[in-house]
Amino acid sequence: MNVKIITPKGDILVRLYDETPLHRDNFIKLVKEGYYNGTLFHRVIKDFMIQGGDPDSKGAPAEKMLGTGGPGYTIDAEILPTLCHKRGALAAARQGDEVNPERKSSGSQFYIVWGQVFKPGQIDQLSKQLQMQQMQQIFNALAAQHKAEIMQFRRERNRQALQDLQDRLATEAEKQVKVAGGGLTDEQKNLYTTLGGTPHLDGQYTVFGEVISGLEVVDSIQQTATKRGDRPIEDIKIEMVLEE
């Protein structure tokens, strides 16, 4: 299913991925309801992304801070290693890990990636960093599962047992990352060094679609002058319609 995003700067046509059905179906539902009509691209950061979908942005006065509105629910994460933050990717905004460890998506807010084009050496280094981050996340999850055991060893001041457990969990985390194919694939590295994007967001947010026409409109919007809160000085209103 495709959705046309109509803006004063031109139209953006996005394709919704079937691999992320929760996000696809929710987006279609909101478009059918006219939920997005009259909202703004309320947050724009040059060489990064453009964000919209806040219902509070409808008719918002110039001084109003935006970015916290939504339909009153979140969507379970559908973060897939095969879907990356290439230029033109459509992804779901969300609250940070500290209050949202499950990385559930906003019920309505979304962003379209612009990012930058990377040099091969840069992307190789980023891939290694992402792999280390994935390993740390898995290790932390495993440690949480062994919390009672860890606390017992600490009470007993059993440093050797703590070290042995840490070593086992680190080995298991490394194994899981290898099985999952941690870091960036060769295809993703090629995308980031040719088309561009924001690879540091991979594995952190749900990507659920991509721009199939109108990327030049995204480019125009991401270059828009902004004020406090990254809100464009000149409102960029949105209308959306479904296209088969």
Image (cartoon, helix red, strand yellow):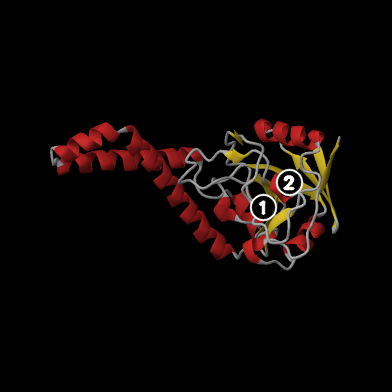
Kind of element beneath mark 2: strand
- Residue 92, percent from left and from top: 64, 44
Q: Decide if residue 157 is in sight here.
A: yes
Check the picture and name the quadrant holding the C terminus: top right
Q: Which is nearer the N-term, disc 1 or disc 2?
A: 1
Residue name at image x 77 percent, y 43 percent: 36
> Label 2: few (<14), some or many (≥20) within 10 Å?
many
Q: Amino acid at mark 1?
A: Lys
For residue 28, above or below residue 137:
above
In the picture of the structure, the residue carrying the numbered disc 1 is 86
For residue 177, above or below residue 149:
below
Residue name at image x 19 percent, y 34 percent: 152
> Label 1: few (<14), some or many (≥20) within 10 Å?
many
Residue in front for this viewpoint, 79 or 195: 79
- Left or right: residue 119 versus residue 112 is left
Q: Are marks 1 and 2 in contact (CB under 8 Å)?
A: yes
In the picture of the structure, the residue carrying the numbered disc 2 is 210
Q: Amino acid at mark 2?
A: Glu
- Residue 183, percent from left and from top: 51, 49
Residue name at image x 79 percent, y 37 percent: 31
- Residue 1, percent from left and from top: 80, 35
- Left or right: residue 161 versus residue 240 is left
Kind of element beneath mark 1: loop
Q: Decide if residue 116 is in sight here.
A: no
Residue in front for this viewpoint, 79 or 63: 63
- Left or right: residue 140 versus residue 111 is left
- Residue 145, percent from left and from top: 34, 32
Residue in front for this viewpoint, 56 or 19: 56
Q: CA distance from mark 1 to mark 2?
A: 9 Å
